[in-house]
Amino acid sequence: MVNTALNSGQRAIDPQARIVAYQGRTSRGYRNMDLRPITDGFAVAPQILPEDVIAIRDAGYHSIICNRPDGEEYGQCSHSEIETAAREIGLEFKMLPIQSEIVTENAAAEFQDALQTLPGPILAYCRSGTRCTMLWSIVKFGELPPEVILQKTAEAGYDMSGLVAQLQEMQNR
């Protein structure tokens, strides 16, 4: 379990899951976020809010990727609200919406390009962080051994075993 009793700017890391609860300063006070590092330069998170970008910057991130389409859920803030807040404080922002569990070759190529060109560390978000983790796994497949992909994503709390098995099967055809 992650310690959520944090002082401003502190991180608590669950040694078994590497899940970071970060309590940081926002425009409305303090808020705990669920930042899940996959690597030193890349993390995923469930839906963030515009007021979270200050804490995201303070946690050391330089770029944000949104993988969640606008209007996916009632009451969800738009990516443009988060993008405006991020750019106002000097963070880069890239919108790469992915419909739930539908990743095209073009989307994977755009995600790969964003990972290579945006200043890091990078935080990617969607509704739960799963789509971001799927994209990362797809673009790193072939670059990293499958067991490393599975280990890093599992440590962040995501099971990519089914996806990696599919990628391996496609590779062996």
Image (tube, rainbow, N blue to C red):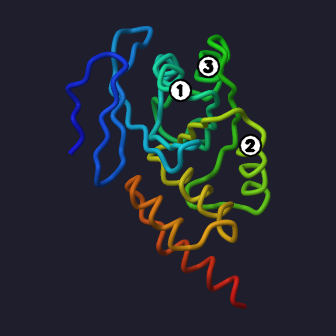
Q: Is residue 131 left or right of residue 21?
A: right
Residue 31 spot, x, y in % from top left: 34, 21
Residue sticking out furthest to the bottom: 173
Secondary-structure class at tag 1: loop
Is 120 in front, or is 77?
120
The residue to which callout 1 is attached is 60
Q: Position of residue 123 (x, y in %)?
A: 56, 37
Q: Secondary structure at mark 3?
A: helix
Query: Where is residue 41 drawn, in percent x and y?
Result: 59, 42
The residue shown at (64%, 50%) is 98
Label 3 is placed on what type of residue? Answer: Ala
Q: Which mark is residue 114?
A: 2
Number of marks drawn: 3
Q: Residue at x 65, y 68 (%)?
A: 141
Front residue (pair 83, 114): 114
The residues bearing labels 2 and 3 have C-alpha atoms spaced at a distance of 16 Å
Residue 170 in the image: x percent, y percent? 68, 83
Question: Of discs 1 and 3, which sits in the foreground?
Answer: 1
Residue at 62% over, 56% down: 135
- Please state, as top left, top right, bottom left or bottom right, where the C terminus lies in the image: bottom right
Q: Amino acid at mark 1?
A: Gly
Separation (CA) of disc 2 from disc 1: 18 Å
Q: Is the residue marked by circle 2 packed among few (<14), some (14-19), or many (20+) residues within 10 Å?
A: some
Instruction: Please name the residue shown 63% across and 27% down the image.
Output: 62
Amino acid type of the residue that numbered disc 2 sits on in the rendered structure: Ala
Check contact, mark 1 vs mark 3: CB within 8 A: no
Q: Quadrant of residue 145?
A: bottom right
Q: Is residue 17 above or below residue 161?
A: above
> Which numbered circle lies on residue 86?
3
Q: N-terminal of the two: label 1 or label 3?
A: 1
The local secondary structure at tag 2 comes to helix
